[in-house]
Amino acid sequence: MTQTIPINAYETSQALVVVAPMPGVMPEDVDVIIDADCVVLEARLRSPAPRDYLIHEWDYGGYRRSEPIAEGFGAPVVARMGNGQLVVTLTRAGERPPDGPIVVTPD
């Protein structure tokens, strides 16, 4: 099951920063892909933990979100994962990043 994940995005003097919560996901389970002027964030769930929940409002893993890349931001693109959050940074006044995957590194 794939969930749409919420994001926070903000600008600094150097970059556009996108932050996405991804609890229960390891950096190697995350894909950040540049695709036709969009940044695509995806994560796979390693193993679901079946439970008899009393309240079940969110799930671990199986995340996907695609957002357009704002004008004026681009390569280099850096993706880091730590404390259950994915942080993607696109450089201000950078060149358009080439389509393809971005390596996600542990924070």
Image: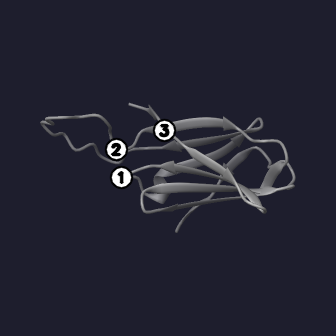
Q: Residue sitting at 29 percent across and 46 percent down? A: 47
Question: What kind of residue is marked 2?
Answer: Tyr
Q: Residue sitting at 52 percent across and 68 percent down? A: 107
Q: In this image, 52 relative to 46: left or right?
A: left
**Foreground pick, 107 / 17:** 17
**Foreground pick, 29 / 39:** 39
Q: Residues within 10 Å of mark 3 (few under 14, many from 20)?
A: some
Q: Earlier in the sequence, mark 1 or mark 2?
A: 1
Q: Nearer the viewer, mark 2 or mark 3?
A: 3
Pointer 1: what residue?
24
Label annotation for residue 7: none
For this orientation, the residue located farthest to the top is 1
Q: Do labels 1 and 2 touch, CB within 8 Å? A: yes
Q: Does residue 37 lie above or below 28 as drawn?
A: above
| Quarter where residue 1 is shown | top left
Pointer 2: what residue?
60
Real-space Cα distance between discs 3 and 1?
A: 13 Å
- Across and down, in percent, residue 38 comes to 71, 38
